Structures are given as structure tokens and as C-alpha cells.
Image (cartoon, rainbow, N blue to C red):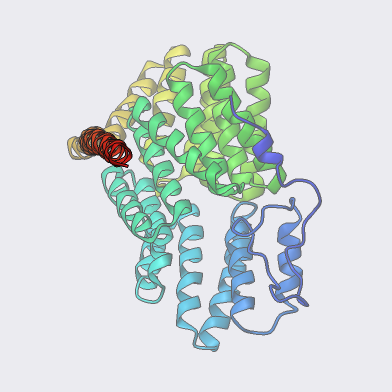
Amino acid sequence: MITISFLFCTWNGTGQIIDLNSKQPYKKVFVETDNFGTSYLSILEDAVNKVPNDTLKFSILNDLAYYWHTRNLNTALDFTKKGLALTRKSRNELWEGRFQITQGAILLRMEKLDSANVVLEDAKEKVLQQDLPFLNTQLGYVFERRGELDKAADYALISLDLAEKLGDKKAIALAYSDLSNLFWKQSKFEKGLEFGLKSVKLFEERGLNDLDYDFTLYVVGNNYLDLGEHQEALNYFNHAIAIGERYGFYNNLSDIYISLTNLHAYLGQYKKAEEAGKNAVKYAELLNNNFMLMRSWLSIGKLQNLQGKYLSAIESLQKCIEIATPAFGDEFYLSQAYEALGKAYVGNHNYKDAYAAFEAYDRLKKQIFTAESDQRISKLQTEFDVADKNNTIQVQEIKIRHQRLIQTLVIITSCLLFLLLLVLYILYKNNKKKNKLLQKQNQEKEFLLKEIHHRVKNNL
């Protein structure tokens, strides 16, 4: 069971993010504190206009821009452009690079994948090494959205390797979260769950709620869902919803409600599924995020197929594909849309359109699940399995060496103790011998003295 207490451990009080009169005027959100609610973006927006044009202003503005992508992508991009203008005016290349990472993160979520890629590559030479794990994570998302899961996995590994060298627990947790999601997309649910639980453990060791911890709970729920462990999946989804509602993570909430639509539909709980579908659409529209909106209508279309409402399903799925547009980058979800549309047409006895939909599905699926991609993910799984075995062997070898060391120490200690006892015994024997000799000598002396005394007495 997930401990909800972790979620609320810092909920008492609103906390103080900004205090311009203190030595630490800004407690960085989700890094130094999570003790706030949905109003934190308003607090940051109010503060950014009160601080001078320096690194403090850049830090607050960058967080404001990045976390606005959880509410509305256009607003997030506006704040990012403001940050880029300020940093370029002050010729601060480091913070310009950091704002470019934020810009790339927003652009890729707007399906502007090529622009995001260019911006992120340009930022590489401007930022510090400690910024690179997060930058590479965003590059991985670009390739994931393009359906190039093998390249996305490579970037996750680059982030993981660098994060481990830097000792950055948050970045390590995020890398495992991304690997979990990629393995889930490849239908390797057991390995996906393993990485997801490892990520959750690392996030909880940090002791802070944040956007990525919330998303990881959702990813773990997805893996449980496809493994048929529905109650575990529901537990994780509910935990993720609690965090998402507390901080206003609309993007995660839309994701979670999409999965809840699928979960309730599978269990035949159609009213709950319909309600979850409405929530998914609501948050996607608030975000102004077509990627989320397309997926929301996809989940509703799948639900309507299960209900036998094929005309409604056709309408929902056509809307889903229309939102995606021909330029939509994520073939993974687009292929699912055409598959579901084909099933809806079959249910409605429209076999000609069903054939066309299934043909599109097959074409898209081949683009995603290429032999190269499958081999790379399988190789990656093998590498991790081998690494786990090697770690197990190393641990066993360390235990054996430890046991041998203890045995050696016991033998040495026993030998030394034996030698000590032997020396003590020899000393005891020698002392006893000396004592007997002295006793004998004393007796002889005593006898001699008595004899002398007796003779002297006789002579007298």
C-alpha cells in the first residue's frame, strides 16, 4: 500500500516561498520546499516583479515559466519568452540556456518537436553539467513523441549515467521513471514496473512531492493496470490524483483520468469511466494541449466501443484524429486511435472504412515497433538484467570475502589466545617449580639452623 502520509507530511501551514527580507529570499519550489498549494504560481508571479534584474529574478521566472506548463502551455511560453529577453539583454548566457531548456520542454508538449530539438541542442553549450541530465531528459521526450523509442531510451540512459556521476538523486529517479514509461510502451510491463517502483523509492527518499514523482505514480499505475493488478493500479492513480489536485498539475491529472477511463471501462464500471473521460477532456482543454486532448477522446472512443455505442465511438475517434492533425508526431497513440476506429467501424458493419482504418493502424505500428527499436529495448533489458546479476554476484563476493575475513580473524585470535594461554601455563609451571625449589631450600636452611643450634647447645 502507498502511504498517503508522505503526501501530507508537509501540508500543515501554507509555508513561505518568498521572503525578500531574509537571507534566503526564495525557497525553490519542489526543491527546497513543497509546503504550498495551487496558489504557488500566483505567489511566484507576484514576486518576480519585485526583485531586481539578477539571478534571483531569473530563478523565480524560470520556475514560473516551467511550472505554468502544467496549467497552460501558451502562458508558460509567454513567461519563457520574457525570461529569454531579459537574459539576452543582460548577456547572461547561463540563464539564457536554462530558459531554453524550459522553452524546449514547452515546445515539445505543443508538438513543435523540431523547434524543441533545435532549442535544446543550442542550450547544451550554455548550461552547467548539473543542468544536462534534465536537458537530455527533454531531448528523450522529443524522440519519444516521434515514436523513436530506441533513441528515447538512449537519452534516458545518458541522463541516468550523468546523474549517478553527479549524485543527483532526483535526476536518477526521473531517468528510471522514463525507462519505466518506455518499457510500458513496448508492452514489457514487468520490467516497466521494476523501474517504476525503483523510481518511486528514490523520489520518496527525497521527502518532497513534485511533478515528476506524481507522474511516476501514474506510470507505475499503468504498468499494474496492464499486468491485471487493478486494485494496485487504482491505489497509485488515486495517490497521483491527490498530488495533482494539490498543486494543480493539470497535465498529470488529464493523464491519470485517461488511464482511469480505461481501467473502469475494462471493469465494466461505465459510469465511472464516463466521468473519468470528462475529467480528462476538461484538464486537457484547460492546458490548451492537443496531445492530451487527442488522447482523452481516444480513451472515450475505446470506452464507447466496449459499451457497443459504435456511432458515438466513431464520432469520438474521428474527433481524436482531427485534433491530432497529419503533423502529429506521436504514432504510438495515433496508431491506437486508428485501431479503435477500425473496431468501431466493424461494430457498425462499415467494413470498407474499417479496412482503411486498420491499414493506417498497421502502417503506424510498423513505424513505432520497428525491429531496431525492439532490439534496442530488448538489449537494454538484457543489459540491466546482466547488471543486476553482476551486482548480485558482487554482493555475494563481498559477503564471502567478509565471511572469510571473519573466519581468518577468528583463527588468528584463537591462535593468539592459545599462545597466550600456553605462555601463561609455562610461566605458571616455572613459578610452581621455583616455589617448590625455594620451599625445599628454606626447609634445608631451617633444618641446618636447627642442627647448628642443637650442636651449639650440646657443646655448651
Residue 329 image offset from top left, x and y in percent: 38, 47
Q: Give left or right: position of 459 versus 169.
A: left
The residue that appears at 64% across and 59% down in the rendered structure is 29
Could you tell me how many numbered marks the image carries? 0
Q: Give left or right: position of 424 versus 65.
A: left
Residue 441 image offset from top left, x and y in percent: 24, 38
Q: Residue 335 lies in what quarter of the image?
A: top left
Q: Give left or right: position of 227 versus 102.
A: left
Q: Quadrant of the C terminus?
A: top left
Tell me if residue 131 comes above or below residue 397 in the rendering: below
Which one is nearer the viewer's eye here, 298 or 376?
Answer: 376
| Viewer can see residue 222 | yes
The residue most toward the bottom is 90
Which one is nearer the viewer's eye here, 38 or 70?
Answer: 38
Which one is nearer the viewer's eye here, 214 or 367?
Answer: 214
Tell me if residue 396 comes above or below residue 56 in the rendering: above
Residue 189 image offset from top left, x and y in percent: 37, 26
Q: Quadrant of the N terminus?
A: top right
The residue most toward the front is 460
Which one is nearer the viewer's eye here, 413 or 158?
Answer: 413
The residue that appears at 61% across and 55% down in the rendered structure is 30
The residue that appears at 64% across and 70% down in the rendered structure is 60
Residue 196 image offset from top left, x and y in percent: 44, 35
